[in-house]
Image (spheres, rainbow, N blue to C red):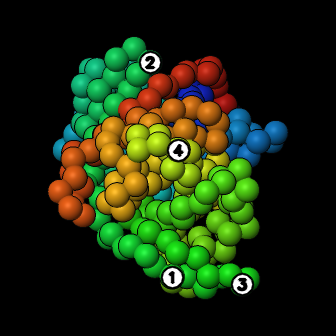
Amino acid sequence: MDKIYFTKMVAGGNDFVVVDNRDGTIDVSPGWAKKTCTRKLGIGADGVLIVERSKIANFKMRIINSDGSEAEMCGNGARCVAKFAQDKEIASNSMKFETLAGIIDAEVTNQRVKVKLTNPINLTLNKKVQLKDTEVTLHCLNTGVPHAVLITEKIENASVVDWGREIRWHQDFAPAGTNVNFIQIVAPQTIKIRTYERGVEDETLACGTGSSASACLASILGLASPPVKMITKGNEILEIDFDRAGENITNLYLTGDVQIVYEGVMTK
């Protein structure tokens, strides 16, 4: 049977299976990704990160979610793949890599990885969305992938899975859907966050692009100022820094620790 060498990595509570496919020998398919990510039956992960060759950067990153769908971008995945690329000598500690959302810059300093995300787009404030039992007010921003943010006073009581799933599939966000973030403002530079992730189709322990979108939206709404510490469901802290001029966000950075859990070999 064919052997595939992989690295299991974690960033901010998101876990990934990372593989080097620059030689193109791995036949990446939705079924294979779903099997690999299925906990108890496979390795188990929020997604698979595929490193491929690029003509415009050090390498290309593909993100396959645990449901087999392909994502444009993943902030914590980008930090993992940057650490992987440095460790495997695919790139130096300062690198550029290609994603479906654009070119990502990254810097690796030991376990600390900082990535510069693409400038956010598609800002929408105070969007009213009717759910089955209530109406909610959402703020939306695309930080590589689409995010909706709902502000709550007690995040522990937030209906992350029920409301998150309903909003994710809501007709207002069709056909692509959206990720859904619930945030609680703790202080001007500290925010708690919980996220329902599209593609994983459940609450995850963290979301890098979601934390970034939430911090930016909180700043635009006058509730926070950068740099913002985002406290995730997994109790990890992600630091989001950016420049803001009115509703325009530039120089958006996501920083946090990355851990290599183990390396192994799987058969396909």
Query: How far apart are the two marked residues, 4 and 2, measured between alpha carbons?
Result: 27 Å
Kind of residue at disc 3: Lys
Query: How far apart are the two marked residues, 1 and 2, measured between alpha carbons?
Result: 41 Å
Circle 3 residues within 10 Å: few <14, some 14–19, many ≥20: few
- Residue 97 higher or lower than 3, as above or below: below
The image quadrant where one finds the C terminus is: top right
Q: Earlier in the sequence, mark 4 or mark 1?
A: 1
The answer to whether mark 1 and mark 2 are in CB contact below 8 A is no
- Residue 29 higher or lower than 188, as above or below: below
| Residue to which mark 4 is pinned | 186
Q: Position of residue 109 (x, y in %)?
A: 34, 17
Disc number placed over residue 128 in the picture, else none: 1
| Residue to which mark 3 is pinned | 132
Disc number placed over residue 157 in the picture, else none: none
Kind of residue at disc 4: Val
Q: Quadrant of residue 94?
A: top left
Query: How far apart are the two marked residues, 3 and 1, measured between alpha carbons?
Result: 13 Å
The answer to whether mark 4 and mark 2 are in CB contact below 8 A is no
Q: Position of residue 108 (x, y in %)?
A: 34, 22
Q: Earlier in the sequence, mark 3 or mark 4?
A: 3
Q: Earlier in the sequence, mark 1 or mark 2?
A: 2
In what element is the residue under mark 3?
Answer: loop
The answer to whether mark 2 and mark 3 are in CB contact below 8 A is no
* Residue extending farthest top: 110
Q: Earlier in the sequence, mark 2 or mark 3?
A: 2
In what element is the residue under mark 4?
Answer: strand
The image quadrant where one finds the N terminus is: top right
Disc number placed over residue 111 in the picture, else none: 2
Query: How far apart are the two marked residues, 2 and 3, measured between alpha carbons?
Result: 44 Å
Q: Residue at x 76, y 42 (%)?
A: 39
Q: Residue at x 61, y 57 (%)?
A: 153
Q: Residue at x 41, y 35 (%)?
A: 239
